Amino acid sequence: MTEMISQRDAYGKALVELGGLNSGIVALDGDLAPSTKTDLFADAYPDRFFQMGIAEQNMFGVAAGLAALGLIPFAATFACFTAKRALDQIRIVIAQPRLNVKMIGAYSGILTGKTGKTHQSVEDITIFRAMPHVVTIAPVDGLEVHRAMHSIVDYQGPVYLRLTRDPCPVVMPENYRFVIGQAVVLREGDDVTIIGTGQKTQDCLEAAHLLAEEGVEAFVLHVPTLKPLDDEAIVQAATHTGRVVTVEDHSVIGGLGGAVAELLGERHPLPIRRIGWQDTFGESGPNQALLEKYGLTAQHVVQAVRDIL
């Protein structure tokens, strides 16, 4: 049976692990510690945990101050609040001076526990891709979250880490090593290239399996780092098959689909289809019903491949 781990659980456990290795790591929370699993760090290192309340702008400002003192602050809240409510503070006091703040966007995308469109963040990748100096990461599973956390601590500068809420299968191998800015080939194929990011890469793999039953062999590329983008890996994968489908739980405007389209438009124009949010907000509802309504399932990926073929 495939192991199921939520990305937020993996984040909380990795933060505790890293906190034991580096006394300079501190954690800040916007009154959501049980949801973001920052409460695990609070229990382990209460003197290095700061409960900032429902004041996200202030939280990131304090995180900037702590970073200026040489500490490594991890500031966690929901992605909708990180990317929008605190955006001016992040831009001015974190991104512009390139301070070493690790910004966590939990409950990203559509599957946020029925919180609805106010809490579903489908623009955060676009925002941080466009903001100078901010590394932007969206892991596929809990194991990749753990590996990414180690790289994030070693990296000197602002990082945005995008996390999902619910348990999901582990697809990365145990010996996997995360490298900032490096895409990962998960499946070889000659007929079409499917490029995914975040948890949606799992749908890319499922779609590739379904397509194989139809005699279509898909090349699957996982892009965990949206900035810096692995240009060469994307161009090579696209060139190999001559057709590309991108998949993300995010707006196709400025997200993975936008990034890939921009890159290939300059380097190697070819047919491309983008699976993701099509310039709309979401709504509250059960996970599967939302995925079906907004065209974000493996079957939608399969249909996009059929269309492009």
Image: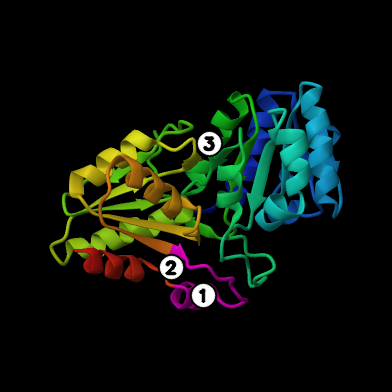
Q: Which mark is residue 278?
A: none
Residue appearing at x 40%, y 38% in the figure: 174
Q: Which residue is mark 1?
A: 290
Gap in angstroms between the C-alphas marked 2 and 3 = 25 Å
Residue appearing at x 73%, y 48% in the figure: 87
**Which region is colored magenta?**
276-294
Q: Which residue is mark 3?
A: 148
Q: Residues within 10 Å of mark 3 (few under 14, many from 20)?
A: many
Label 2 secondary element: loop
Percent of width and height locating residue 294: 47, 73
Where is residue 205, by image quadrant?
A: bottom left
Q: Residues within 10 Å of mark 2 (few under 14, many from 20)?
A: many
Percent of width and height locating residue 164: 57, 55
Q: In front: mark 1 or mark 3?
A: 1
Foreground of the two, 74 or 274? 274
What amino acid type should be assigned to the residue bearing mark 2? Leu
Residue appearing at x 53%, y 42% in the figure: 137
> Which comes before the other along the chain, label 2 or label 3?
3
Gap in angstroms between the C-alphas marked 1 and 3 = 28 Å
Question: Image quadrant for the C terminus?
Answer: bottom left
Q: Is residue 214 above or below residue 40?
A: below
> Which comes before the other along the chain, label 1 or label 3?
3
Residue 2 visible, this orientation: no
Q: Is residue 277 above or below residue 198?
A: below
- Dots 2 and 1: beta carbons under 8 Å? yes
Residue 227 visible, this orientation: yes
What amino acid type should be assigned to the residue bearing mark 3? Ala
Side of 155 where 39 appears, left or right: right
Q: Which residue is mark 2?
A: 296
Q: In front: mark 2 or mark 3?
A: 2
What amino acid type should be assigned to the residue bearing mark 1? Leu
Side of 234 where 168 appears, left or right: right
